[in-house]
Image: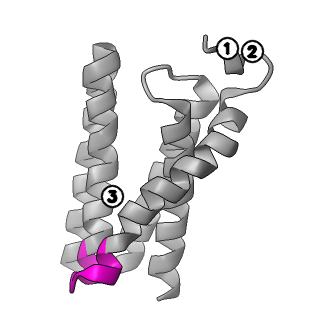
Amino acid sequence: MQPEMKSKSPLWVGLGSKGLLATLIIGSATFAPLLVTPIGKDIWSMILLFVATLVYVGFAVLNDHSKLWRTSIQTLVAIAVVLLAVIIDAQWVVALGLVGHAIWDAFHLRRGQLYVPWWYAGACIYVDLIAAAFLLLN
């Protein structure tokens, strides 16, 4: 167990100062394409959801191969969500997928999954929820 985890739950560590700092960094990189390229929010959100799931696959490959099956299924679900959004032309489906991914992140933090850094999972919760709100409000 990481030293900082002794007194606080993994969920609160991930959502704490390190998660917020990582949110600023990851969030800036995540939302920058909307400001500097002609990419539409529809395409951007689909790419975001897919890439967010691939990061977990990467962490599983690097840190714990036993989690690879779970993270791969999560990526397949994201692909299905993106395809459904394209087929029915509904961005709310991608927003729902992003909220689902935030719940996935919270699950990792709550369970203390060590193959995903606390700061990343916390930042991903924030970025997923902000992106979902952005999709639903625009």
Q: Amino acid at mark 3?
A: Leu
Q: Which stretch did the figure color magenta?
A: 33-43
Foreground mark, 2 or 3?
2
Is 134 in front, or is 31?
Answer: 31
Residue 54 appears in the rendering:
yes
Q: Secondary structure at mark 3?
A: helix
Q: Earlier in the sequence, mark 3 or mark 1?
A: 1
Q: Is disc 2 in contact with disc 3, using a CB cutoff of under 8 Å? A: no
Q: Which residue is mark 1?
A: 3
What residue appears at the point 46 percent right and 89 percent down from the top-left corner? 138
Relative height, residue 113 to residue 128 (above, below): above
Few, some or many C-alpha atoms within 10 Å of disc 3 (few <14, some 14-19, many ≥20)? many
Q: Which residue is mark 2?
A: 6
What residue appears at the point 37 percent right and 62 percent down from the top-left corner? 29
Looking at the image, residue 86 sits to the left or right of residue 25; the answer is left
Q: Amino acid at mark 1?
A: Pro
